[in-house]
Image (cartoon, helix red, strand yellow):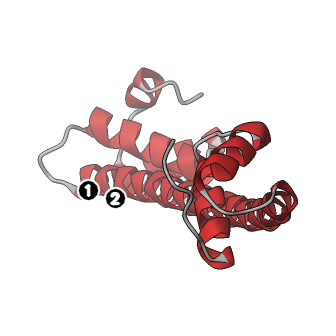
Amino acid sequence: MGTKRKISKSKAVDEIVVLLENGYTTQLIVSEFCSNFHLTERTIYNYLKEAKQKHTAKQIEIEKELMNVDVESKKESRKREILGVLDIQETLSKIIVSSNESTTDKLKAVSELNRMLGAHDSDKLRRELTENNNVSNNDLIKININV
């Protein structure tokens, strides 16, 4: 059997916190400290009480950090969704003003953009498209705009 060592209170409490973090039970910790250090069982239980308070405080801090990380992650995810929508709207706008796109593609882009913006009144859209862009009713039927 080895000789028992002396240990300061703060060092003992810190070591107990580490043991708690590693899943040691109270009984194992008391047994370990009784066999290795010049400490009474009562002293070890007092240190254990303090160590459990520190351990609990650490766990609460970890939980708070995880919550903050989760909130930040959700914010970033939402930003990516918003940017995704803005990218889609930008692409649709480019199609609408492009001279290389067919009338049908432009109409589909206008329809989709209006749907995304919540301005998809088909009668209003039909009037605007036919008046401003010389679009025929047949083109409107192709993209499912009521005529």
Q: Secondary structure at mark 1?
A: helix
| Quarter of the C terminus within the rendering | top right
Pointer 2 and pointer 1: residues touching (CB < 8 Å)? yes
Three-letter code for the amino acid on which mark 2 is drawn: Glu
Residue 34: x %, y % from top left: 70, 50
Q: Nearer the viewer, mark 2 or mark 1?
A: 2
Q: Is residue 34 left or right of residue 104?
A: right
Query: What is the x, y in percent for residue 88?
Result: 37, 49
Q: CA distance from mark 2 to mark 1?
A: 6 Å
Note whether residue 130 is visible: no
Image vertical order of residue 65 relative to residue 105, above or below: below
Residue 81 seen by the camera: yes
**Identity of the residue drawn at 51% across and 55% down:** 3
SS for callout 2: helix
68 or 134, which lies in front?
Answer: 68
Q: Nearer the viewer, residue 74 or 134?
A: 74
Q: Which residue was labeled with disc 1?
A: 94
- Image spot of residue 145 (x, y percent): 54, 30
Which x, y percent locates residue 139? 38, 29
Residue assigned mark 2:
90
Q: Amino acid at mark 1?
A: Lys
Residue 142 in which image quadrant: top left
